[in-house]
Amino acid sequence: MPTTTETTTYDSFVTLTIKNYEKKLNKQFLEYRPAVNILFDNYKHTDTKGGRIWQGIAEYGVNPTVKFFDGADTFSQEVTQVAQPIMYQWRYMGATISLLKTEMLENSGPVALADLTEVRLKQCLRTMNLIIGNEIFSDGTNYGGKTFIGLAAAVSTTPSVDPASGSLGGLSAATWNWWRNNATTSFGSFAANGVNGSASDLVLRQFNNCTDGMVERPTDIISDQATWEFYNKTNIQPVRYVDQVNATADLSFKALEYQGIKWVWDRQCPTGRTYILNRNHIHFMVDPRYMFEWTSDLQYPNQLAYTRIVGLRLFMCTRVRMFSAVLDGITA
């Protein structure tokens, strides 16, 4: 039987375990799901200005006063509109890990106690990752509207219709035609309409629709498993697989290449659907001041239990919609 001198206090063991595993666990959080990995973009997009609403701008249109001229031709002094404000509400996500006093006594000793905590830490972050992965493909109405607006609204199968969660970024796609993504619905057979299809190539068509012919081009393709396998079959053997892994991450998942970018599949992507995305325009915004921030010990009346809460502040930011696309209804 362990002696009382072997018992590690809750505060010291949780603090030490979080400190020792925080960097590793955060990497695993980033890397655990393909869509989460891609859209968090290695935590590159950050904002610490505070406030409840984040505001940016969506650029559009051209300057109609630009022209060739000769001699004393006059120029228009028209004031042209070049951008519209976009606004997103910061969202908060949290979870707890708890230990009972009885568990602390039964798992006495630094090794046993740390092992129990590490398992619960990993379970906590894995679950948060899973939920964020689900919400990436949602329309922003889940959890009573407290979640962020996901791809179902940002890269919609009905681009000219505003999502049920409200106008995306405060701009109405019904009003502004440039605030619409590209979409192919009722895609049908991949063998006929997919990459090098026998009838057409709708993937190539939408890929090209997501470029400006020069600078702008997609950075990633995300699909469901079956569509990824349909594409795999079209490749001349041997297939070239690429490890999709960030420079700071420990885990990896397989990707295929298409037009020089990575095509991955995600188990949480809706069946028969593919997203063509540009991470410069669609990505998560995070607040580094509140990213996996843990509270101190919390104790509740009439309970011999200790709890800590972890929280993060984030939202999915869509700056430009015209350079993204969705293909839906894909079959073999």
Image (spheres, grey):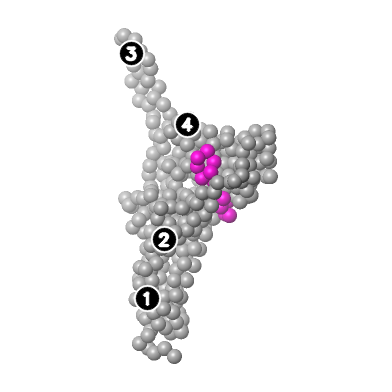
Q: Give the structural element (helix, strand or loop) at label 3.
A: loop
* CA neighbours of label 4 inside 10 A, class few (<14), some (14 to 19), many (20+): few
Image: magenta residue range: 257-269
**Up-down: is 298 above or below 86?**
below
Residue 180: in sight, yes or no? no
Tags 2 and 4 in contact by the CB under 8 Å rule? Answer: no
Work out how far the residue at label 1 is from the one at label 2, CA to CA, in angstroms.
Answer: 19 Å
Kindly state the secondary structure of the residue where label 1 is placed.
helix
Residue 74 image label: 3
Q: Which mark is residue 212?
A: 4
Mark 4 touching mark 3, by CB under 8 A? no
Q: Amino acid at mark 2?
A: Asn
- The amino acid sitting under disc 4 is Asp
Give the Cα separation between the discs numbered 4 and 1.
54 Å
Mark 4 element type: loop
- Residue at horizontal 38 percent and vertical 48 percent from the top: 45
Q: Which residue is mark 2?
A: 26
Instruction: Tell me which amino acid carries mark 1.
Output: Phe
Between disc 3 and disc 2, whose residue precedes? 2
Q: Position of residue 4 (x, y in %)?
A: 37, 88
Dot 2, how many residues are within 10 Å of its Cα: few (below 14), some (14-19), or many (20+)? some
Marks 1/2 in contact by CB < 8 Å: the verdict is no
Is residue 285 visible in the rendered image? The answer is yes
Q: For the N terminus, which image quadrant?
A: bottom left
Quarter of the picture containing the C terminus is top right
